[in-house]
Amino acid sequence: MQDASILKADEMRSIYLENKGDSFLVHQLPIEAQFSPVYAITAIDANKDGKMDLLLAGNNAWTRIRYGRYEANHGVLLLGNGKGGFAYVPQSKSGLNIRGDVKSLLTIKQGLITKVLVGLNNDNATMLEIK
C-alpha cells in the first residue's frame, strides 16, 4: 500500500459545466438530480420550446453489499429555461420509467421525431421516443 496513489474527490453533486471560453462555470442541477448516481446525460428539446432540456439516467446495482443498490434514478427530465437554469419534471408527467443500470444515452433524430437510445449494463438497450 505504500506505493498506492491517493485520489481525492472534491465535487460529488450532479452538475453541469458551462464553457466560458477561458474557464468553466459550475452549475448545480436540481435536488432531484442528486438522488442517485448519474452516468449518462443527453441534451434534447423535450417540450419543443426551442430551449435545450436535459435527460439524465444512471443507477448502480453493483455496489458492495454493505451499501446496497443505488436505484432511485428512473430517468430524470430537466426542462431548460434557455438561461442555464433547469427545472425538474415529475416522473408522473415525464412518463419516464427507465429500469436498470444506465451507462449511456444517445439522441437520434428521425425527421421531426426524437428518440433516445438507452444503453443498459448487462441488459438489452432500450429506445425511448420523445413525444
Image (cartoon, rainbow, N blue to C red):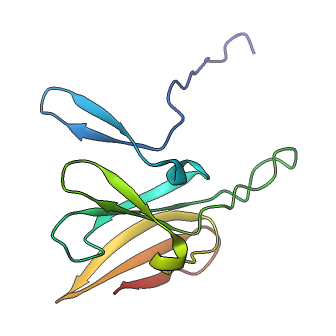
- Nearer-the-camera pick, 44 or 93: 93
- Nearer-the-camera pick, 94 or 112: 94
Q: Residue drawn 70% across and 55% down?
A: 70
Residue 96 seen from this side: no
> Residue 29 location, x and y as percent?
42, 46
Q: Quadrant of residue 55?
A: bottom left
Residue found at the far top of this picture: 2
Q: Residue drawn 57% across and 21% down?
A: 8
Q: Residue drawn 51% across and 52% down?
A: 33
Residue 11 seen from this side: yes
Residue found at the far left of this picture: 21
Q: Residue drawn 87% across and 50% down?
A: 65
Q: Is residue 89 left or right of residue 99?
A: left
Q: Quadrant of residue 56?
A: bottom left
- Location of the N terminus (image quadrant): top right
Residue 68, above or below 5: below
Q: How many marks?
A: 0
Residue 85, above or below 107: above
Residue 22, above or below 117: above
> Residue 90 location, x and y as percent?
50, 69
Q: Is residue 19 left or right of residue 87?
A: left
> Residue 63 location, x and y as percent?
75, 50
> Residue 86 location, x and y as percent?
34, 54
- Location of the C terminus (image quadrant): bottom left
